[in-house]
Amino acid sequence: MSMPQPATPIVLHHGIFGRAELGVGKLKLRYYNGIDVAFEKLGHSIIIPTVHPTSSIEKRARQLKSIIRKQLKHLGRPKDRVVIFAHSMGGLDARYMIHKLEMADYVSALVTLSTPHHGSAYADWCLRNLDRVRGLQVMRFLGLDVDACNDLTIEACARFNEKIADVPGVQYFSISASRPWHRVPPMFYHSHKVISEVQGPNDGLVAVESAKWGEHLDTWPADHLHVVNRRFVLEIKNKTGDVTPRYLKVLERLREADCLP
């Protein structure tokens, strides 16, 4: 009698400014709030990397590869293929890693969530205005690695897409998100306005059209942080609420596509 096949390991990769978890002492907040627990209940081993929060796509991708390989070895499954859920800039890290760093044999599917595949108009705005006041020069003088600012512009992402092709054998899926400006956290009011004027509907940091890549599964009624179940807006009408069921629905689609046993 054959043993049942173990559930596919799932990687939950964070975006710009992110970490696997935040907190002090025993008080810890996971980046993907509750999503890891829901996946674990289904039998999946979870890999939650922490890479440099503001460095370049290339540097973050190399760190991501190292963590995934080490964690697979630690799980006793060094040759297994994983499914990656990647939020925001993390989706670009994962695409680079799969294409450039010989990781296609270790990834069966990539699901990107509000990833600026075609750049963010707000990155353009920030870069333009930081250059005006020599902000980037000052940050680099202080030893801060802020190469992510350059990598997320519309022009930079266009160049990225010319060089980083989808790899046969890996399936690519995407989720976008959108909310009107008055339903995003106040810290996103300005970025939402900037992006709306250039790229249209968005989640406060990434436009719907920019987030589409591979098989576009859905546009969630959520802001950029709500996509990973971080809720900073009180919902009174038309509540989106806990997005965990939406992640479980994505798993169903991955099973249909034979990305999961």
Image (cartoon, rainbow, N blue to C red):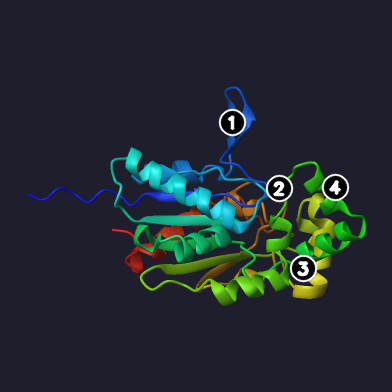
- Compare marks 3 and 2 and give the one earlier in the sequence: 3
- Compare marks 4 and 2 and give the one earlier in the sequence: 4
Residue at point 46%, 66% (across, down):
99
Q: Distance between the residues labelled 3 and 2?
A: 21 Å
- Compare marks 3 and 4 and give the one earlier in the sequence: 3
> Given contact means CB atoms under 8 Å apart, are the residues at marks 2 and 1 in contact?
no
> Given contact means CB atoms under 8 Å apart, are the residues at marks 3 and 4 in contact?
no
- Name the kind of residue labelled 4 in the image: Val
Q: How far apart are marks 3 and 1 (CA)?
A: 33 Å
- Compare marks 1 and 4 and give the one earlier in the sequence: 1
| Count of numbered tags | 4
User: Closer to the observer: label 1 or label 4?
Assistant: 4
Q: For residue 168, what is the image quadrant?
A: bottom left
Pick the front one: 23 or 58: 58
- Compare marks 2 and 1 and give the one earlier in the sequence: 1
Q: Is mark 3 on a helix, strand or loop?
A: helix
Residue with the mark numbered 1: 28
Q: What element carries label 1?
A: strand
Numbered badge on residue 138: 4
Residue with the mark numbered 3: 121
Rendered view: 225 above or below 103: above
For the C terminus, the image quarter is bottom left
Q: In the image, is 157 to the left or to the right of 138?
A: left
Rendered view: 203 above or below 209: above
Q: How far apart are marks 1 and 4 (CA)?
A: 33 Å
- Name the kind of residue labelled 3 in the image: Ala
Q: Residue furthest front?
A: 141
Is residue 45 in view? no
Q: Report crowding for label 2: few under 14, some 14 to 19, many 20 or more residues within 10 A (C-alpha).
A: some
